[in-house]
Image: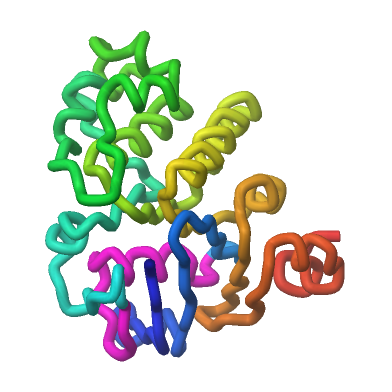
């Protein structure tokens, strides 16, 4: 579904990504792990077209997309939920969802207001509330739900558990598991190891913009040396 090959990117004169390669298959959840500043968010932005790669290729559903504008990439069915969430704070929850609405895609069950409420029941009670009036956890749910209204086949999620209460983290975990059952592929960046372990099939570890580890999430979880070396976890 998603294939990244030898991706290089810069911020000004500073190289942020060094020949990074990764892949995500249909209905697979893959996590990018790493410390702050490792390059996780940069990787997602480069894939989504928000940061132009200097070298390398990004292919989505067999089509090369690294030279496309971000809005064209989104219309192909690659959704993106930024770390900052970026909901429209002056619009209601329902209006935010309507902003994300796109046509149904072949082979993808269309997302409706009813389906996102089934995934995130909290939102059903907040349709009339403005985005700036709901909690951080509710904003995270809204950001994911708004992206789903675009009927993506693959979603990029940047630090979805950051700053969330444990009960909300549990709801997001349940939602990601449901997306997997629905056939949606997910690539997420994450620092919360337990969150990643609960949802991911495979893991990549990034350090200083370079790939340091690639394997199953289960294998990484069983390797205390790798966890300590790359994440500082015992």
Q: How many marks?
A: 0
Q: Horizontal placement of 30 versus 8: left or right?
A: right
Residue placed furthest toward the front: 107
Q: Position of residue 61 (x, y in %)?
A: 30, 69
User: Looking at the image, which residue is at 59% across and 76% down?
Assistant: 207
Q: In the picture, which quadrant includes the C terminus?
A: bottom right
Colouring: rainbow
- Tell me residue 176's x, y (percent): 51, 41
Picture quadrant of residue 50: bottom left
Q: Is residue 48 magenta?
A: yes
- Return the residue nearer the eye: 15 or 82: 82
In the image, residue 163 sits, relative to residue 62, either above or below, namely: above
Residue 14 visible in the picture: no
Point out residue 232 in the picture as x, y percentages from the top left corner: 77, 65
| Residue in the picture at 81% in, 68% down | 228
- Which residue is more in the foreground, 225 or 133? 225
Q: Is residue 177 above or below residue 29?
A: above
Which residue does the image show at 67% across and 73% down from the upper left?
215
Q: Quadrant of residue 7?
A: bottom left
Give x and y (percent) for residue 169: 59, 33
Q: Would residue 184 be seen by someone viewing this image from the given angle?
A: yes
**Residue at 83% across / 68% down in the picture?**
223
In front here: 191 or 1?
Answer: 1
**Rendered view: 13 above or below 229:** below
Q: Quadrant of the N terminus?
A: bottom left
Please report the bounds of the magenta region as a residue range: 37-58
| Nearer to the camera, 226 or 200 | 200
Q: Is residue 163 magenta?
A: no
* Left or right of 202 in this view: 43: left
């Amino acid at each position: 579904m998603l294939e990244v090959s030898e991706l290089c990117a810069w911020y000004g004169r500073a190289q942020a990504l060094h020949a990074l390669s990764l892949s995500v298959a249909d209905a697979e959840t893959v996590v990018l792990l790493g410390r702050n500043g490792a390059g996780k968010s940069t990787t997602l932005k480069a894939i989504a077209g928000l940061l132009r790669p200097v070298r390398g290729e990004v292919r989505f559903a067999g089509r090369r997309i690294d030279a496309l504008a971000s809005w064209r990439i989104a219309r192909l069915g690659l959704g993106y939920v930024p770390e900052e969430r970026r909901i429209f704070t002056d619009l209601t929850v329902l209006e935010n969802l309507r902003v994300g609405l796109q046509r149904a895609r072949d082979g993808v069950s269309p997302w409706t207001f009813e389906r996102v409420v089934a995934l995130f029941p909290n939102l059903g009670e907040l349709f009339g509330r403005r985005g700036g009036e709901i909690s951080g956890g509710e904003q995270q749910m809204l950001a994911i739900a708004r992206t789903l209204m675009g009927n993506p086949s693959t979603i990029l999620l940047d630090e979805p558990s950051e700053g969330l209460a444990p009960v909300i983290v549990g709801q997001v975990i349940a939602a990601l598991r449901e997306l997997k059952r629905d056939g949606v592929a997910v690539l997420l960046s994450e620092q919360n190891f337990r969150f990643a372990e609960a949802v991911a099939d495979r893991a990549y570890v990034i350090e200083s913009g370079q790939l340091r580890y690639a394997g199953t999430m289960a294998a990484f979880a069983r390797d205390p040396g790798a966890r300590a070396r790359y994440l500082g976890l015992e």
